[in-house]
Image: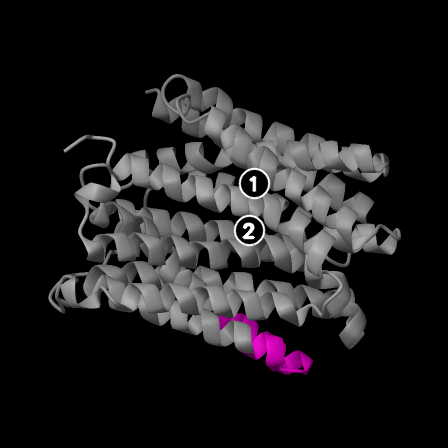
Amino acid sequence: MPENNLAGSMSVSSRKVILGSITASIAFVLELTLVPLLLPAIQTQFDLSISELSWLFNSYGAAVAVGVLMGGWLGDTFNTKRVFGVGVMFFAFGSAVVAYGGVYEAIIAGRVMQGFGGGVFSPLIPLLLTRSSPNRPGKILIVWGSVAGYVAAFAPFLYGSTLAIYNWNLAFVIFAAVSLAALAIINFSLAEDEPASLTKSGPSYFRLLRSRDLWVMFGYVFCTYGAITYYLFRLPLWLAENDFRVASIGFSLSTMWLSFSVLSTLLRNKVDEPHVRGILLAAPVLIASGFPLAYFCQDIACLVLASMLIGAGLACSNAPSTQLILKFAPKKMRAASVSLDITFARLGGVAFVAVLSQSLFGYAVVAVVLMCIFAFLCALAAAKRFNA
């Protein structure tokens, strides 16, 4: 059979698992990219203060951080696809609650359910994909990453230019519909999944947290992802305050994700020794450069350039940080290490938004630059250990 015939070498069940997993990841990515675009409309409809709006935004991120830890442990202990399906179900139900809740408290509850479900299923996606394509795991992961990256790049622009005339609730209806489609697809292949096993022992997170090198990398992830999440939260609100149209806001966010996708593709063969050190160090520099540019130059061209720098920073921090975390992880605990990687990234976003949401944007820029300096120092220490 030809090597490039990836689909032909799989069973029908494996193809359904791949399709269902990628569909679920699209729902997860749509939430990440579209919700920042919806914040001004939600704030206006419910007359929310910036503090209340940050709670609405952060409730999801905090729930994801908890759900990721649960998903990693449950996926290693029970039937992986069934755990994945439960997570997708929580995500879909939470999205529906947000869409039709009608009051602030119901939206918060829906965001928590949505975030917990996303946290449970998202770390299981690469596991399901590589199990379904054991002969070509790298290829299927590249396909997955490409689809997610370009959905992230074009969704804000398409929504802002075509669907913004509808109520913001429509986006959450879309999240629910896409995740339910993923659940329907993957349910057809459950009969061929591995049997549940209650005898497996889950990961020992205490053992992981005793590693000094991992703490250095978690600090790096906390700061870089925290800064990027704050940018996603604050930029749409700041642009709306300055009377930018929804389409312009969507275009700025799309530019960030497109920059991330394109640079990630270009770096795919470079994220290795000895290049990883330079790429890791470049991320906080790029992020720290983007924030002052967005603040001091309010022209749309400058904002697009700032978004490109932030997206490039995400591309330079994403794969290299995961690579080092996997290298520093204790034996047989790589999956648990990735779960903690995601958790610290989400906690960084929650912390940055909570602390800086009520600050003037200028003060927030100074705080972000200082945290990027700390991330740069963490990168220096980690890269030195990586090359040792």
Name the spot of residue 320 as percent of width and height, x first: 43, 32
Residue 356 visible in the displayed image: no
Q: Quadrant of the N terminus?
A: top left
Q: Amino acid at mark 2?
A: Gly
SS category of the residue bearing label 1: helix
Res. 300 mark = none
Residue 111 sits inside the magenta stretch = yes
Asked if residue 74 lies left or right of residue 290, the reply is left
Q: Depth check: give the residue in front, 16 or 114.
A: 16
Residue 224 visible in the displayed image: yes
Q: Residue at x 73, y 37 (%)?
A: 291
User: Spatial distance from mark 2 to mark 1, Cα to Cα?
Assistant: 8 Å
Residue 28 sits inside the magenta stretch = no
Name above or below for residue 89 compared with residue 192. Answer: below
* Mark 1 Cα-neighbour bin, 10 Å: few <14, some 14–19, many ≥20: many
Name the spot of residue 197 as percent of width and height, x first: 13, 67
Res. 224 mark = 1
Name the spot of residue 309 as percent of width and height, x first: 66, 31
Q: Amino acid at mark 1?
A: Thr
Q: Residue at x 73, y 60 (%)?
A: 164
- The single residue placed furthest to the top in the displayed view is 274
SS category of the residue bearing label 2: helix
Q: Residue at x 41, y 25 (%)?
A: 271
Main SS, magenta region, reads helix
Determine the image quadrant of residue 251: top right
Q: Which residue is mark 2?
A: 348
* Mark 2 Cα-neighbour bin, 10 Å: few <14, some 14–19, many ≥20: many
Of the image marks 2 and 1, the number of the one nearer the N terminus: 1
In magenta, the rendered stretch is 97-115
Asked if residue 153 lies left or right of residue 299, the reply is left
Name above or below for residue 265 compared with residue 95. Answer: above
> Do the residues under discs 2 and 1 have CB atoms within 8 angstroms?
yes
